[in-house]
Amino acid sequence: MKYIDFENKNIVVSGGTNGMGLYLVQRLVELKANVIVLGRNIDKPELKELRRKCDFFTCNIANIEEVNDTFDQIKSKYNTLHFAVNNAGVTAPYSNISELDIIQWKKIIDINLTGTAHCLKREIQLISQNKNGAIVNVSSCAGLQALKMQAAYSVSKAAINMLTQVAAIECAIDRDDAHSIRINAVAPGPILGGMNSEENLAKNPEKTQRKLSITAMKKFGTAEEVANSILWLLSQQSSYTTGIILPVDGGFSSGKFN
């Protein structure tokens, strides 16, 4: 599938320094987009080559001052945005609600939900200057079906789904001299890489099998499969699609398989 929408377009990707976010950034560079990467660790050696091709900003999205400063710099340098992908997020330690660490809870909500909301606010302001703008939020299959011992993470991702849909209907038509923006989300299931690296999976075969068992397809997804879904939602190939939460989860959200 060819994507023709991204050449010379300005696109922000938060959480773009590792895992799915990094793969997406690499794809967008290949598609000749002007990629603006937000992350907490932009000086990693493995990013050296990519730093010549993208604009990197150190930004902890849980910090309101950092988000405002970063988007002020983006506005000053680029004036406008065309697309955005809100991928920054963290997972939570396994815990029953009766033993929940509220400090950990607040950290998860501050990053996954409040940080995403604040980025979304600033992105809408900049993207609404252009026609055919689009935003994709990265949610999770955990936001579609409850996962035990993952209250903070599941709640944060379920809230992102609702945030996505509220934003989508608010931005669905042109008004007040601003253009409409399509806003959608993807909800990945177990994806290879990051916490699901080959090394980590080999260390705990039982846990690996549990992750596989929640999917209908009984296999892990890949960063490429998630990126393809994000690119489709950003592109004009999905021009009549807004407010959806697209599962990329091997059938997890269709039912219970374990």
Image (cartoon, rainbow, N blue to C red):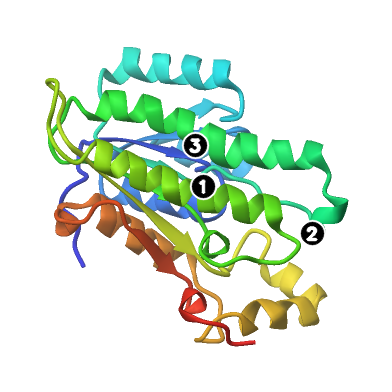
Q: Are marks 3 and 2 in contact (CB under 8 Å)?
A: no
Position of 152 with respect to 241 (left or right) is right
Q: Dot 2: what SS?
A: loop
| Residue at 50 percent of width and 86 percent of height | 217
| Residue at 19 percent of width and 58 percent of height | 238
Q: Are marks 1 and 3 in contact (CB under 8 Å)?
A: no
| Image quarter (top left, top right, bottom left or bottom right) of the C terminus | bottom right
Q: Disc 3 designates what residue?
A: 116
Identify whether 30 is placed above or below 211: above
Precedes in sequence: disc 3 or disc 2: 2
| Residue at 78 percent of width and 81 percent of height | 205
- The amino acid marked with disc number 2 is Tyr
The CA span between labels 1 and 2 is 19 Å
Depth check: 226 or 53 in front?
Answer: 226
Q: Disc 1 designates what residue?
A: 159
Identify whether 210 is placed above or below 39: below
- In the current view of this chain or complex, which residue is farthest to the right? 99
Precedes in sequence: disc 1 or disc 2: 2
Identify whether 207 is placed above or below 258: above
**Rendered image: mark on residue 94:** 2
Where residue 21 sits in the image (x, y, percent)?
48, 49
| Residue at 24 percent of width and 34 percent of height | 82
Precedes in sequence: disc 1 or disc 3: 3
